Image (tube, grey):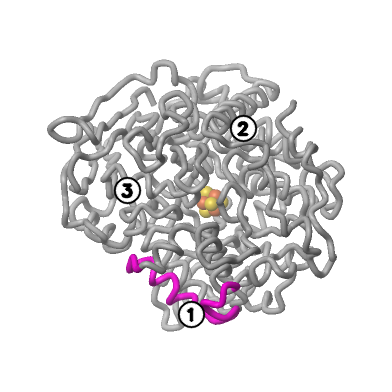
Amino acid sequence: MDKIIRINMGAEGGPQIKEDSPGEYAGIGGRALTSAIVAKEVPPECNPLGEDNKLVIAPGLLSGTTAAMSGRISMGCKSPLTGGIKEANAGGQPSQMLARLGYAAIILEGKPQDDSLYKVEINKDGVKIIADNSLKMLGNYDLIEKMKSEYGEKVSCISIGPAGEMKMSAASIACTDMEQRPTRHAGRGGVGAVMGTKGVKVIVIDDTDCKMRPPQDPEKFKEANKIFVAGLKSHPVTGEGLPAFGTNVLANIINEAGGYPTNNFQMGQFEGVSKISGETQAELEVARGGLATHGCHRGCVIRCSGIFNDKDGNFVTKQPEYETVWAHGANCGIDDLDVIARLDRLDDDYGIDTIEMGATVAVAMEAGLAKFGDGEAAINLIKEVGKGSHLGRIIGNGAAVTGQVFGVERVPVVKRQAIPAYDPRAIQGIGVTYATTPMGADHTAGYAVTANVLGVGGNIDPLKPEGQIELSRNLQIATAALTDATGLCLFIAFAILDQPETFQAVIDMLNAFYGRSLTADDITEMGKTILKGEREFNARAGLTAQHDRLPEFFHKEALPPHNVTFQVKDEDLDQVFNW
Ligand code: SF4
C-alpha cells in the first residue's frame, strides 16, 4: 500500500485526482491513518459539511493479505453528528481490494462547484472520476444493481444512499459484501453525509489481476496466521457462539444481565426477548432457506453474519446484527424479527445507521409519535427518512435532534451520538467507554462487556464502579491499535483477550508482514498515540471534559431489575486517558 489518492472535488474545471506516496503517513493504516490525516489536515473548528472537511477511506494494515479477518475498512472525517473526530469502520469486500490495488487511502477533499453527482472508478490502470446524475437519490440496492450491470459481478462498491445525499447526520457509508449487496455499513457519526457533501455517490473498485500483498517473511507470516486461526476456532465465543447464532447471541445474555435497554432505556429487560434472540433468529433463517453462518468478506473464519429471508424464502437483508435487533427491537418494544429485518433493509437502502435510527425511533415513540411495540409505525417513520420529508429529516439527523425537536428529556446520547445496546447502569464499564471515547457513544471503542458480563479477559462486577476506568482505558488502547488500525475484525477481541498465544500471533503477523519487531508495549504505544491525536483534535474542536459524560437520567433514574444508577464519578472519568 504505497499510494494515496487525493481527489479535490472543488478544483477549477472539475474534480482533480492526484496520486501521492504516503509520505509522513507511511506505515500506518485503518483508524491510525484516517485519524492522523484528519488531525493534521482538517481544521478542527471547520463546518463538517463544508469544503474544509475531508473524508478519508483507509484499509487496515493487514488488509489485502492472506491474514484471516483482515477486511475492515476505516472511514474518517470531522463528524457532523458529534462535532469531533470520527472513525467508523465496516466489513465487506472493498478493504481487501483497495489494499491489493496498492492504495493506503482515498482522500476526498473540497466541495464540488456545481450539484453534479460523481462516481469514482479504481482499477489496476488507475483512478477515474465521472459525473453521473442518473445516480441521484438512488437507494443503495438499486445503485449497486446499476453498478453490477455496468462493471460486472466482481467489483466491490463503497456508496451512499439518499440520506448521505441529503447530508443527514445519521447517514452511513455502505460497502458491498461477498454477494455484492450493500449490507456492510460504516454506520456511525454521519460519515455518509460527508461523502454526500463531496458529491461522490459511489466508488467502484476492481482488483482484477491484482495479487495478495506479499509478506516480508512468508513462512513466519503463514505460521502466525495459522496460530491465529486456530485460536479463533478454539475459543467458545469466536469458535462456537458467534458462528452459530451471530452477534445476536448476546440478546439473551445481556437481557439476563439486566442491561438490555428496553422502551428507550426505561428498563433493562425485555419481555419479548425470546422472540428476537439469536437462537430464534438462526432457527428462522435456516427454516426459510437463508443462512445462520456466513462471512461478510472473504477470509473471515468466525462468520458471525447470515442471510435473512422472508417467509416465502426471498432475500430481505443480511442477518440483522445484535445492535440492530436491539435498536429496532427491544428499544422500541418490538418483538417481531420480520419487522426488524424490514427496518434493517430500509436502513441499508437509505444509507442510515441502524443504531442511531433505532434509538431515534424510540425517542420519537417516547414523544408520542408512535406507540412502543408498533412495528408498522416504526417502518413508516423510517420511510419518512427515505422520502426526505420534514419529519424524515428530523429523524435522519438522529436521536439528539429528534429529542430536542419533540421536547424529550430521556435522550440516550453522548456527544450527540446514540448510545448502543448495553445499558451503562447495568454494565458500568461500557458506560465509561461511551462517556469517554473520542467517537461519541460507541461500544466498539472499548468493549467492556467482556469482563463485565462475558467473563472474557477477567471478571469485574458490572454494577459497581470499581475497576471500570482501568478496564475501559486498556480496551480503548488495544482496540485502537490491534483491530481498528490493522483491519482485523473487532470480534477477534474475545480470543486475543483470553488467549496469550492468539494475541501474540497478531503481533507476529504484523512483524512478519512488515519486517518489524514490534512488542506488546509498542502496540500499547500505538493505541495511545491514536487516542491522544483524536483527543487533541476534539479539544481544538471545542469538546471539553463536560462532553465526556453520560446524560443526566443515567445518574437519576434507577434501572430495573437491578435498580441501579451509573455510579462512576466524573473525576474518575477524567482519568481514563491519564496513563
Ligand atoms: S466476524 Fe462477522 S463482522 Fe467480523 S469479519 Fe466475520 S462476518 Fe464480518
Q: Earlier in the sequence, mark 1 or mark 3?
A: 3
The N terminus: image quadrant: top left
Q: Which type of secondary structure does the marked residue at label 3 adopt?
A: helix
- Start and end of the magenta stretch? 366-389
- Image position, residue 544 (x, y; %): 63, 36
Which image quadrant for residue 457?
Answer: top right
Q: Are marks 1 and 3 in contact (CB under 8 Å)?
A: no
Could you tell me how far apart the alpha carbons at marks 2 and 1 are, in whole angstroms? Answer: 46 Å
Mark 2 surroundings within 10 Å by alpha-carbon count, few (fewer than 14), some (14 through 19), many (20 or more): many
Mark 3 surroundings within 10 Å by alpha-carbon count, few (fewer than 14), some (14 through 19), many (20 or more): many
Q: Which type of secondary structure does the marked residue at label 1 adopt?
A: helix
Residue at 59% in and 38% down: 438
Residue identified by numbered label 3: 196
Left or right for 453, reference 234: right
Instruction: Please tell me whether mark 2 or mark 1 is closer to you in this view.
Output: 1
Residue identified by numbered label 2: 506
197 to 292, vertically: above or below: above
Residue identified by numbered label 1: 377
- Image position, residue 292 (x, y; %): 54, 66
Residue at 39% in and 62% down: 393
506 to 27, vertically: above or below: below
- Image position, residue 368 (x, y; %): 56, 77
Left or right for 291, reference 138: right
Q: Which type of secondary structure does the marked residue at label 2 adopt?
A: helix
Amino acid type of the residue tagged 3 in the rendering: Gly
Specify whether residue 230 is in view.
Answer: no
Q: Nearer the viewer, residue 177 or 338?
A: 338
Q: Are marks 2 and 3 in contact (CB under 8 Å)?
A: no
Residue at 61% in and 30% down: 531
